[in-house]
Image (cartoon, rainbow, N blue to C red):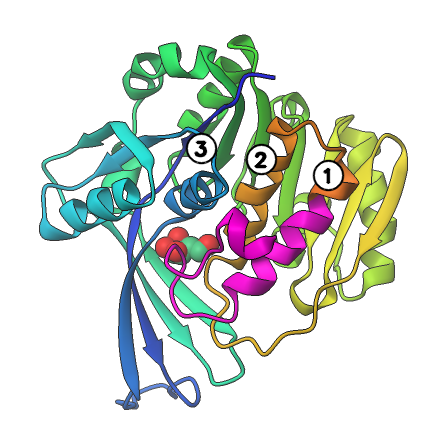
């Protein structure tokens, strides 16, 4: 397989607020600290893939502000090629992430420049898509552009890994077109129309979904691990027990790692086991991109 990875998606400036509980309505609640770091599902997934050693290209938009500069510099620091990231005249995407003491996170994301990604941007990236073995996508750019990108990436011959996060309406024909669909339990409920409140329920529903779409599906379930449906089989991959401090980017670390394994021609179950190791390291440190492990660390 071609060894390049292209990620089409978002870049966000993350502000992670350390709080002991969520504020009540009308309350001004003090945070115990703030960590600012580079994020965005797209850029996070690109950084994890690059940290594992593959030539990785980011396609997206940042604003013409200091946050945009910071996002480009951080991606480049981690060896992500940003020549297909366009600067718009507006502001960059950003996220305010409330981080509770148990490591859980509640995020609000400002769309910013991510929603200016256009068909023209995707067309401009066709040369690199044609050279890529894997293309990764998420839902932090307009749905219409996600659908267009899926089609273009398939035509270019890429294996398409689609992280349908956050959950938004994507036409079934495009969901069926991707090779691997990855969602967490909240997104899985949206796409299945069923409550996923246990691993058993996840196993039941992932099979229905994989049969419906005719592709491989992964449900990431946080501390419960993940469930994979591929080639007519369903497997539960348990999580690795660690002391999580902040879980932002855990799912992105998992997806970047899976893409690395696909390039290495590993089977999907082994890929998910490797990805579980990567995300278990990511949750033990603050921030998304800064906390992701290198291949050396995983070894
Ligand atoms: O998946 C984590 C990411 O989601 C954060 O970095 C934040 O920017 C949001 O996009």
In which of the image's four quarters is ligand 1 placed? bottom left
On the picture, is 14 further left or further right than 274? left
Give the alpha-carbon distance from disc 1 to disc 2, as whole Å. 14 Å
Q: Which residue is denoted by mark 3 in the rendering? A: 143
Q: Residues within 10 Å of mark 1 (few under 14, many from 20)?
A: many
Q: Which residue is denoted by mark 2 in the rendering? A: 259
| Residue placed most toward the observer, 205 or 50 | 50
- Discs 3, 2 touching: Cβ within 8 Å: no
Q: Nearer the viewer, mark 1 or mark 2?
A: 2
**Magenta residue span:** 272-299
**Residue 103: x and y, percent?**
51, 77
- Discs 1, 2 touching: Cβ within 8 Å: no
The magenta stretch spans residue 96: no
Is ligand 1 closer than 8 angstroms to the Cβ of mark 1? Answer: no
Q: Is residue 7 visible?
A: yes
Q: Nearer the viewer, mark 1 or mark 3?
A: 1
**Residue 139: x and y, percent?**
46, 40
The N terminus, quarter of image: top right
Q: Is residue 190 visible?
A: no
Q: Which residue is denoted by mark 1 in the rendering? A: 217
The residue drawn where x is 23% and y is 40% is 113
Give the alpha-carbon distance from disc 1 to disc 3, as whole Å. 20 Å
Mark 3 residue element:
helix
Q: Earlier in the sequence, mark 1 or mark 3?
A: 3
Using the rendered view, name the quadrant where residue 259 is placed.
Answer: top right
Give the alpha-carbon distance from disc 3 to disc 2, as whole Å. 22 Å
The residue drawn where x is 53% and y is 58% is 250
Q: Residues within 10 Å of mark 3 (few under 14, many from 20)?
A: some
**Residue 150: x and y, percent?**
52, 22
The magenta stretch spans residue 273: yes
Q: Earlier in the sequence, mark 1 or mark 2?
A: 1
């Amino acid at each position: 397989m071609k060894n390049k990875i292209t990620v089409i998606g978002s870049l966000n400036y993350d502000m992670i607020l350390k709080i002991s509980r969520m504020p009540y309505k009308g309350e001004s609640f003090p945070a115990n600290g703030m960590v600012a770091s580079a994020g965005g599902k797209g850029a996070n997934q690109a950084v994890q893939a690059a940290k594992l050693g593959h030539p990785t290209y980011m396609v997206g938009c940042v604003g013409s502000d200091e946050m945009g500069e910071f996002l480009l510099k951080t991606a480049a620091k981690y060896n992500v090629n940003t020549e297909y990231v366009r600067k718009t005249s507006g502001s960059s995407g950003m996220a305010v992430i409330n981080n509770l003491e148990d490591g859980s996170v509640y995020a609000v994301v400002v769309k910013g420049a991510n929603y200016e990604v256009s068909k023209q941007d995707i067309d401009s990236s066709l040369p690199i898509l044609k050279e890529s073995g894997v293309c990764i996508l998420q839902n932090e750019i307009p749905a219409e552009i996600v659908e267009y990108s899926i089609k273009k990436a398939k035509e270019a011959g890429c294996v398409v890994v689609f992280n349908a996060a956050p959950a938004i309406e994507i036409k079934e024909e495009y969901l069926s077109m991707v090779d691997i669909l990855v969602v967490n339990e909240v997104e899985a409920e949206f796409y299945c129309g069923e409550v996923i409140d246990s691993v058993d329920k996840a196993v039941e529903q992932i099979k229905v979904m994989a049969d419906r779409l005719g592709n491989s599906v992964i449900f990431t379930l946080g501390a419960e691990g993940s469930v994979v449906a591929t080639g007519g089989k369903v497997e539960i991959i348990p999580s690795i027990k660690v002391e999580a401090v902040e879980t932002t980017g855990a799912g992105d670390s998992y997806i970047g790692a899976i893409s690395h394994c696909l390039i290495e021609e590993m089977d999907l179950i082994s890929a998910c086991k490797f990805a579980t190791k990567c995300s278990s390291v990511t949750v033990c440190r603050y921030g998304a991109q800064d906390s992701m492990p290198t291949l050396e660390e995983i070894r």
